[in-house]
Image (cartoon, helix red, strand yellow):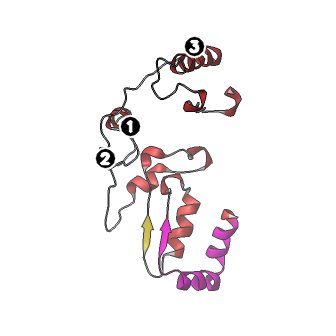
Amino acid sequence: LIYFTGYILENYPEVKDKWQSKMNYVMVDEVQDCSSLDWAIFETLSGKFGNLFIVGDPDQNIYEWRGAKLETFVDYKPETDIILNQNYRSTSTILDAANSIIDYNKIRIKKDLYTKSGKGDTITHFHGKDEREEAEWISNQIKKLTKPKLLSKGGKYSDCAILLRSSYLT
């Protein structure tokens, strides 16, 4: 659909003019994951009025495998840049860790994330040699946390959650 849309807008000026006239404003979210064809489409659609508003974070780029070109976003020169660096969901412990890692990204827009949410709990990191060792470590952590004397809030299994990076790990 994206290729077909690009083809239509490029080869049928009457269609391009119609859609440009209908779109006084164009807003694109998650622009860090847009391909060069995506960019061509929304720049074409916003071409008549020039009201293009893009939102994105180059440090959250995950779709390079599908053609996203991070350089296109980072090199884009808007009339106004607004950096949204206050985080409302994470603690300063989490953001300090994130800042220390993302600072090494080579293609990025410099920002320092901060929060007013307080320090929060310490981060525990465990890197197992394989999936089985990771699963055993997680199981042992849950066993420790669900012992009634260690959790004043009840120590129930329903107080725990496991997030997986891939479904095959289940």
The Cα–Cα distance between marks 3 and 1, rounded to whole angstroms, is: 25 Å
Establish if 148 lies above or below 119: above
Q: Residues within 10 Å of mark 1 (few under 14, many from 20)?
A: some
**Residue that appears at 63% across and 68% down:** 6
Establish if 56 lies above or below 43: above
Residue 165 shown in magenta: no
Q: Secondary structure at mark 3?
A: loop
Could you tell me the amino acid type at mark 1? Ile
For disc 1, the marked residue is 102
Looking at the rendered image, the disc whose residue lies closer to the viewer, 3 or 1, is 3
Could you tell me the amino acid type at mark 3? Lys
**Front-lying residue, 11 or 46:** 46
**Residue that appears at 49% across and 75% down:** 46
Q: Tell me if 118 is positioned left or right of 149 in this view.
A: left
**Helix, strand or loop: magenta stretch:** helix
Q: Position of residue 57 (x, y in %)?
A: 43, 51
Residue 16 shown in magenta: yes
Mark found first going from the N terminus, 3 or 1: 1
Mark found first going from the N terminus, 2 or 1: 1
Q: Secondary structure at mark 1?
A: helix
The Cα–Cα distance between marks 2 and 3, rounded to whole angstroms, is: 34 Å
For disc 3, the marked residue is 129
Q: Secondary structure at mark 2?
A: loop
Q: Position of residue 2 (x, y in %)?
A: 66, 63
For disc 2, the marked residue is 111
Could you tell me the amino acid type at mark 2? Lys
**Front-lying residue, 151 or 142:** 151
The circle drawn on residue 83 is none
